[in-house]
Image: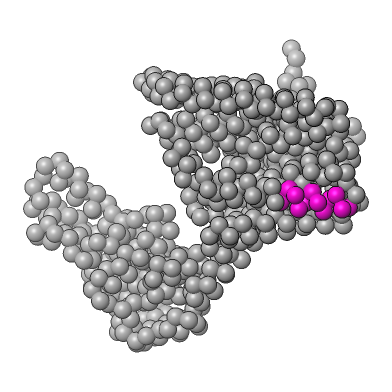
């Protein structure tokens, strides 16, 4: 019987799955994006790393990958799934709302970056057609990496999405343009092929739009009636594959079909289920793609040409960041948004590798030149998460300066309520205090939260309350009350102990995770601690009983009885002499009080 261990494809699959099983949890443990991990795996275990030693050590074939071409189809399928998932998050209405950015800033960014990079390469000795091909290739940005990091709903995410959408659409004309100016093809023939492909592709896309709106809802409805997750998954994958094959058959990129399939399904009521059921496949396939990117990097070549490679990477990043940021700023984006989007979009793209291959095939650039820029692209993709963090930090500092959110610019007045933590609960408390003409000052350690709150007009300062100097600046001895809403149990107990020792009479109201945490807060000196899990459960119980037709009187009595039981539990856990305070959720007239409007039952994820 033939052993599967003799099949290289089977061994490669085991290596990839093993890498995913190690990389994702290991990097998540240290809060580092697994993107870097997958690329490093490709560098280490690929044909330029340990894979090159398979001839000397046979056992390495079980833990390394020697043939990057063997897993390339899986990587391409990963990109197709990624574009499909992006389409699911969109709608035609939303795309239409982004048309100014897509065809305005997106087109200007690609053309301007491509011309600048190409001009520099031309001045350095590259022939004109080759410089044009390299410029357009390097001007592309990574859809696979940028959108998972930026999302599609934030200002930065919307700007990135718009420009990346134009690039995804432009990839096909770019490839045909390179073929049209190839020395091996006459210009007339090249342009004829380009026009024929675009015409045929447009017709196929139109047919897909019409048939998709008519057929897809019915197909997914039938799949949903079977209540079979397997059938639902099979139908989803079939739609992706057929749409990709349809556009690929016309000469367009298969990712265009995948994006269109996602857009069509997004218009149906089944898009949420499709998104959930395809998510694991997208993540794994994207990991395979990133491993192939790492395989493009040969450490020996990098060491031999490190100066040229660093210069090339820095040059591309700087040009694209400046052009993208400048165009967004010109289009009216805030300085922080323009800066962050510019830096995030600065590295080359996975589609850069496709354009480089097309330029090489068209004989516009030499294979050695293509290999050099492939390494530049791989390095650029590797540092994309670092660029994202750098751009985010710089943008937030710019926003803080422009909005005057620095802590020195926010005065601390006497008789204010100090709110530490400005998530949803902190914001609602601030709104209620404003309604009743109560002065307050909020404090938060998240610079994004502070900047946004300042833009919305809230009196807030940036600061780390774990430091005694920061607590001193709050002048708690002159404060009216202290409210702790942050989701940091240990820190909240520490703050209560410190403040109670300094200001014995200050009212301290704290959010508690559960009964045990509430007992700790009371022991530390809190005036009132509200267990979010407890109050949320009681409110849900009350709502269920009322909806089931139980009279309000018995419901309120039951809730009070349960609250008394929990009050005694807190007293026992905290070894307290007096019973703690627990707030009432409803009054006898079934009307909410001002305190009741604070949603203490919100989960930490909802508040952040």
Which corner quadrant holds the N terminus?
Answer: top right
Q: Is residue 263 left or right of residue 515?
A: right
For image coordinates 80% across by 30% down, the residue present is 187
Segment tinted magenta in the rendering: 113-124
For image coordinates 31% across by 78% down, the residue present is 439
> Magenta stretch containing residue 115, yes or no?
yes
Q: Nearer the viewer, residue 115 or 555?
A: 115
Overall secondary structure of the magenta stretch? helix
> Magenta stretch containing residue 265, yes or no?
no
How far across and down, in percent of the image, does residue 544 sit?
A: 20, 44
For image coordinates 17% across by 55% down, the residue present is 559
Q: Nearer the viewer, residue 588 or 59?
A: 588
Dividing the picture into quarters, in which one does residue 536 lie? Answer: bottom left
Q: Is residue 209 left or right of residue 533?
A: right
Which corner quadrant holds the C terminus?
Answer: bottom left
| Residue 356 visible (yes or no) | yes
Relative vertical location of residue 369 with respect to residue 310 in this rendering, above or below: above
| Residue 580 visible (yes or no) | no
């Amino acid at each position: 019987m033939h052993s599967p261990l003799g099949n290289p494809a089977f061994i490669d699959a085991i290596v990839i799955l093993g890498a995913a099983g190690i990389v994702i949890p290991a990097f998540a443990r240290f809060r580092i994006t697994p993107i870097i991990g997958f690329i490093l795996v490709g560098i280490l275990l690929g044909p330029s790393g340990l894979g090159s030693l398979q001839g000397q050590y046979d056992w390495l074939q079980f833990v390394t990958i020697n043939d990057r071409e063997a897993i390339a189809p899986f990587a391409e399928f990963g990109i197709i799934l990624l574009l499909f998932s992006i389409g699911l998050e969109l709608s035609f209405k939303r795309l239409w709302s982004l048309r100014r950015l897509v065809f305005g800033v997106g087109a200007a960014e690609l053309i301007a970056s491509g011309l600048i990079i190409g001009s520099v390469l031309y001045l350095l000795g590259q022939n004109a057609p080759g410089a044009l091909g390299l410029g357009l290739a390097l001007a592309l940005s990574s859809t696979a990496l940028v959108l998972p990091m930026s999302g599609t709903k934030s200002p930065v995410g919307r700007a990135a999405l718009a420009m990346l959408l134009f690039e995804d659409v432009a990839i096909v004309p770019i490839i045909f343009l390179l073929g049209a100016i190839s020395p091996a093809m006459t210009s007339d023939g090249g342009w004829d092929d380009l026009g024929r492909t675009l015409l045929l592709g447009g017709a196929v896309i139109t047919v897909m739009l019409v048939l998709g709106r008519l057929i897809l809802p019915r197909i997914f409805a039938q799949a949903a009636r079977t209540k079979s997750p397997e059938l639902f998954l099979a139908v989803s994958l079939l739609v992706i594959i057929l749409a990709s094959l349809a556009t690929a058959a016309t000469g367009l990129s298969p990712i265009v079909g995948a994006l269109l399939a996602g857009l069509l399904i997004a218009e149906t009521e089944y898009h949420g289920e499709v998104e959930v059921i395809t998510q694991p496949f997208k993540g794994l396939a994207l990991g395979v793609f990133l491993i192939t990117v790492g395989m493009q990097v040969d450490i020996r070549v990098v060491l031999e040409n490190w100066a040229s490679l660093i210069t090339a990477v820095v040059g591309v990043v700087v040009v694209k960041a400046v052009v993208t940021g400048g165009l967004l700023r010109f289009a009216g984006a805030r300085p922080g948004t323009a800066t962050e989007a510019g830096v995030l979009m600065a590295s080359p793209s996975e589609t850069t590798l496709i354009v480089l291959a097309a330029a090489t095939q068209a004989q516009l650039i030499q294979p050695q030149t293509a290999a050099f820029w492939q390494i530049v692209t791989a390095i650029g993709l590797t540092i994309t998460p670092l660029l994202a963090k750098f751009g985010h930090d710089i943008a937030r500092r710019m926003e803080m300066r422009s909005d005057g959110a620095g802590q020195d610019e926010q005065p601390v007045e006497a008789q204010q309520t100090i709110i530490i933590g400005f998530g949803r609960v902190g914001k609602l408390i601030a709104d209620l205090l404003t309604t009743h003409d109560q002065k307050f000052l909020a404090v938060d350690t998240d610079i994004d939260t502070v900047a946004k709150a300042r833009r919305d007009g809230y009196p807030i300062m940036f600061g780390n309350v774990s430091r005694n100097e920061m607590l001193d600046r709050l002048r708690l001895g002159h404060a009216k009350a202290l409210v702790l809403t942050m989701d940091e149990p240990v820190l909240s107990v520490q703050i209560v102990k410190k403040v109670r020792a300094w200001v014995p009479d200050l009212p301290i109201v704290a959010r508690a995770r559960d009964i045990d945490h509430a007992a700790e807060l009371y022991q530390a000196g809190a005036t009132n601690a509200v267990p979010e899990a407890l109050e949320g459960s009681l409110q849900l119980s009350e709502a269920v009983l009322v909806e089931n037709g139980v009279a309000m009187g018995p419901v309120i009595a039951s809730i009070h009885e349960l609250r008394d039981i929990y009050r005694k539990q807190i007293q026992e856990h905290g070894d307290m002499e007096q019973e703690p305070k627990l707030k009432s959720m409803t009054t006898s007239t079934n009307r909410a009080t001002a305190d009741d409007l604070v949603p203490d039952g919100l989960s930490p994820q909802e508040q952040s």
